Image: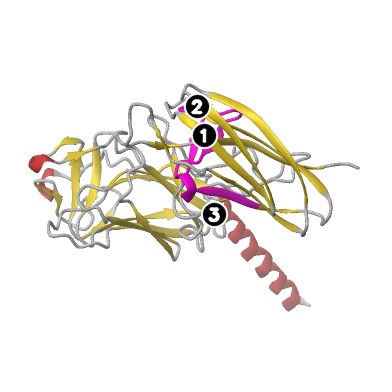
Amino acid sequence: MASLFSLSFVLIFCLCISFASATSVPYLDDLLQNGDFEQGPKPSNMKKTVIIGKYSLPKWEKKGIVEWVSGGPQPGGFYFPIPRGAHAARLGNEASISQYVKVKPNTTYSLTFGATRTCAQDEVLTVSAAGMSSDLPIQTLYSADGGDTYAWAFNANSDLVKVTFHNPGIQEDPTCGPLIDHVAIKEMSPATYTKGNLVKNGGFENGPHVFKNFSTGVLVLPVKQDKYSPIPGWMVQFAKPAKYIDSKHFLVPSGSGAVELIGGRETGIAQIVRTVPKQFYNLTFTIGDANNDCHGSMTVQAFAGKASTEVSFVSSGKGWFKKASFKFQADTSRTTIAFYNPYYHTKIHDFGHMCGPVIDDVSLVRVRK
């Protein structure tokens, strides 16, 4: 009896220690330590712009040729866009920077980071954490000012994960490679329903970290590059990212978040919902423009299983939206709700800045007989 009591006490004690360890990690929604790279190496650990020493960049571990650079014109005719601050890390041939982060095990986190190519058209950035990784083909510039921001999500497999940014490329100039100018992390809450709506996170209120001082939106990668979506409940389809936008920097039809379909026919967002075969449903959503000078005739294609509709409007890029809906009959117990933009769009006075129609307030309700 005494041994049974002792065993029970040990089990309870271990559970308490485990719970205390998990709850000791605060909710994360901010920059990593020195995530803006404004803390630079000591002058003695620099050779021009190249960092000398594995741990010379505060709070980061580096491998290979890594530069601590300032934004603006550079020798040789280059220009480094660093829109959120004054400094960034530039990853040369096969170089990387890493940082350990305390997290909650079995919890999904999203990294938000600025990444821009500086030399080659075929530059790739590999981001990894918790045993997962993804290659980002950053040769496409979605913002002409170099302010591209990406989100990438992962599921923590322990209470300490190593976040790494790596340049796998080899160029003739060994310093050539992507710029990393801000890195933030956010603990992602599970996608939830609102009362009466069969779509999870239909208002896109749950999304990745958005930088406060400057934002051109956050690029969310297709599901083949990111298994854990930074927009809980939703997955990005096809080859190009969708853009998560916030109400501080864009016109959002309601709430604090929405999605902009910027990649033309190469971008779509989708969610699989539970339905009852032969039951009728009504799918309602809001479309418009983000008040970001995105102009032209725009069309959104909405799908619910085999049923679909098209909604078109002419945008002047000044901020406008309208509601749309259509009725369909489910034929299976799982129905895919999806939205696509069949055309490519750019800003009125900036043809290098890709944009598109905005989706918000997605709602699916059962039609009563």
Task: State the separation of the CA atoms marked 2 and 3.
Answer: 37 Å
42 or 177, which is in the foreground? 177
Residue 8, position as x, y percentages in the image: 72, 70
Percent of width and height locating residue 55: 23, 55
Q: Secondary structure at mark 2?
A: strand
**Real-space Cα separation, disc 3 to disc 1, in angstroms:** 35 Å
28 vs 78, nearest the viewer: 78
**Mark number displayed over residue 282:** none
Dot 3 or dot 1: first in sequence order is 3
Q: Which mark is residue 298?
A: 1
Relative to 106, is 62 on the left or the right?
Answer: left
Amino acid at pointer 2: Ser
Q: Which mark is residue 315?
A: 2
Amino acid type assigned to the residue bearing label 3 in the image: Thr
What is the x, y in percent for residue 341? 52, 43
Which of the two discs, 2 and 1, labels the residue nearer the N terminus? 1
Reading the image, the residue beneath label 3 is 108
Q: Mark 3 against mark 1, which lies toward the viewer?
A: 1
Task: Say whether marks 2 and 1 touch (CB < 8 Å).
Answer: yes
The quadrant of the image that shows the N terminus is: bottom right
In the image, residue 195 above or below residue 226: above
